[in-house]
Image: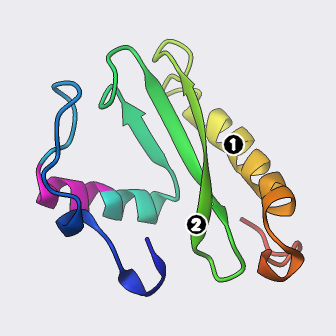
C-alpha cells in the first residue's frame, strides 16, 4: 500500500484476465490485497500464467512500507503448499538482505527488529 493510503483497486480498472484465475473484479482484488497485507506475502497461483506459481514478499523501508518486492517463480510442483513456509522463510531472508543493498542507511529498518 502506498504511504497515506493512496492508490488501490479503484484506480486500476478496467482489469483484464490473463487466465481464468485472474482476479478482475475490484471488490475481489481489494479483498485479496487485504489478505496479502495481513499475511505479509502474495501468492499468484496461475492468475497471470497457467502452470506458474509465484510467491512475493516486500522489501520494507524504515516506516514499514514496501519499497520493492522479491518474487520467487516456479511451477506448482516446486512451490507446493507443503513447502510454502520454507520458500517464504528464504524469500524473507533475501528481502531483508536487499534492504541493505537497495535502501540508504536512513531508510532501512532497525537491524535488531525481527521480521
Q: Magenta region's main secondary structure?
A: helix
Residue 110 on image: x %, y %: 84, 78
Nearer the viewer's eye, disc 1 or disc 2? 2
**Label 2: few (<14), some or many (≥20) within 10 Å?**
some
Residue drawn at x 29%, y 54% as measured from the top left: 32
Is 112 placed above or below 63 here? above
Residue named by callout 1 = 91
Q: Closer to the N terminus: mark 1 or mark 2? A: 2
Is residue 71 on the magenta stretch? no
Query: What is the quadrant of the C terminus in the image?
Result: bottom right
Find residue 24 and report its image quarter: top left
Residue 55 on image: x %, y %: 52, 38
Q: Whole-Å distance between the Cαs marked 1 and 2?
A: 14 Å
Residue drawn at x 73%, y 52% as measured from the top left: 95
- Specify whether 58 is left or right of 92: left
Residue 15 on image: x %, y %: 17, 47
Is 76 placed above or below 4 here? above
**Label 1: few (<14), some or many (≥20) within 10 Å?**
many
Residue drawn at x 77%, y 46% as measured from the top left: 94
- Specify whether 80 is left or right of 102: left
Q: Which mark is residue 102?
A: none
Question: Which residues fall within the magenta stretch?
Answer: 25-32
Is 59 placed above or below 89 here? below
Q: Secondary structure at mark 2?
A: strand
Residue drawn at x 45%, y 25% as measured from the top left: 53
Query: What is the quadrant of the N terminus in the image?
Result: bottom left
Residue 25 on image: x %, y %: 11, 51
Kindly indicate whether the residue at mark 2 contacts the one at mark 1 (C-beta within 8 angstroms). Answer: no
Residue named by callout 2 = 66
- Specify whether 114 is left or right of 88: right
Amino acid at each position: 500500500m502506498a504511504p497515506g493510503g493512496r492508490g488501490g483497486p479503484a484506480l486500476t480498472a478496467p482489469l483484464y484476465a490473463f487466465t481464468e484465475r485472474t482476479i478482475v473484479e475490484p471488490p475481489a482484488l481489494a479483498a485479496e490485497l487485504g489478505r496479502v497485507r495481513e499475511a505479509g506475502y502474495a501468492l499468484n497461483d496461475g492468475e497471470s500464467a497457467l502452470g506458474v506459481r509465484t510467491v512475493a514478499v516486500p522489501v520494507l523501508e524504515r516506516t514499514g512500507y514496501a519499497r520493492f518486492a522479491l518474487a520467487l517463480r516456479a511451477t506448482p510442483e516446486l512451490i507446493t503448499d507443503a513447502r510454502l513456509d520454507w520458500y517464504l522463510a528464504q524469500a524473507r531472508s533475501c528481502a531483508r538482505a536487499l534492504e541493505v543493498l537497495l535502501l540508504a542507511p536512513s531508510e532501512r529498518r532497525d537491524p535488531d527488529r525481527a521480521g
